[in-house]
Amino acid sequence: MKIIMLGAPGAGKGTQAKRIANKYNIPHISTGDIFRANIKEKTELGNKAKEYMDKGELVPDDITIGMLLDRIHKDDCKNGFVLDGFPRTIPQAKSLTNALSELGEKIDYAINVDVPDESIISRMSGRRACLNCGNTYHIMYSAPKTENVCDNCGNELVIRDDDKPETVKKRLEVYHDQTQPLIDYYDNEKILASVDGTKDMEEVFLDIIAVLE
Ligand SMILES: [Zn+2]
């Protein structure tokens, strides 16, 4: 069960990816984790990636895919994996398809958690954070006991820059420009399944399971 998660930033694909991983006992793999592990273990690819990052440059796709292939061939991936946050662009998707097909492998499902922009913007604008202890809240889904006050440490809660509507809109623009074309790409590959991500988190999860089973 080799799964790729697709969806806009804030669509909730990370949460669903974790739940899928738990249910099927397969690893949830994010590129951030792969980078950190390779750099920490000072692997050849990790060292190369770090050179680019230290210069403030983007890490070339072949290095990222190299690290990804290493990761998905570890023992814990023998029953599959859920990939979250990669690929983000058509060139990355094509490189991944090619690299896997050279090994006689392929992705089985690309799951698109579909949420309209307006819903994402309104969801994100409800987030609140404590800059003192790092706790996060949501005014609708996980509200603090006292409005605008951290349950944990009593500090005042703020809206992080990342959650402000203008920032969210910019991220969504990048997503529509670079990542949304992947939906058509995986549709052509006949492995795309879209689920309605505006539903309750539990329902979204059940819809995903229905696709996988
Ligand atoms: Zn706090």
Image (cartoon, rainbow, N blue to C red):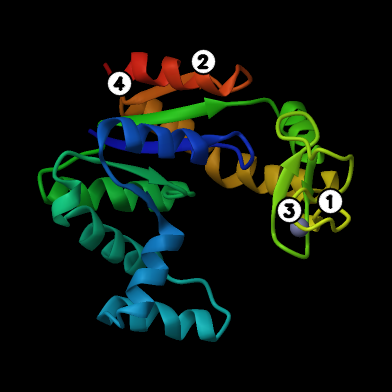
Mark 1 residue crowding within 10 angstroms, few (<14) / some (14–19) / many (20+): some
Q: Tell me the CA gap for discs 4 and 2.
A: 14 Å
Decide which of tag 3 and tag 2 comes sooner along the chain: 3
Residue located beneath label 4 in the image: 212
Q: Tell me the CA gap for discs 4 and 1.
A: 36 Å
Q: Tell me the CA gap for discs 3 and 4.
A: 39 Å
Q: Quick check: marks 3 and 2 in contact, CB under 8 Å? A: no
Position of residue 38 relative to residue 154, above or below, is below
Mark 4 belongs to which amino acid? Leu
Which one is nearer the viewer's eye here, 173 or 154?
154
* Kind of element beneath mark 1: loop
* Kind of element beneath mark 4: helix
Decide which of tag 2 and tag 1 comes sooner along the chain: 1
Residue located beneath label 2 in the image: 203
Mark 2 belongs to which amino acid? Glu
Position of residue 22 relative to residue 74, above or below, is above
Which one is nearer the viewer's eye here, 146 or 92?
146
| Residue visible at 10% across and 44% down in the picture | 104
| Residue visible at 47% across and 31% down in the picture | 183
* Kind of element beneath mark 3: loop
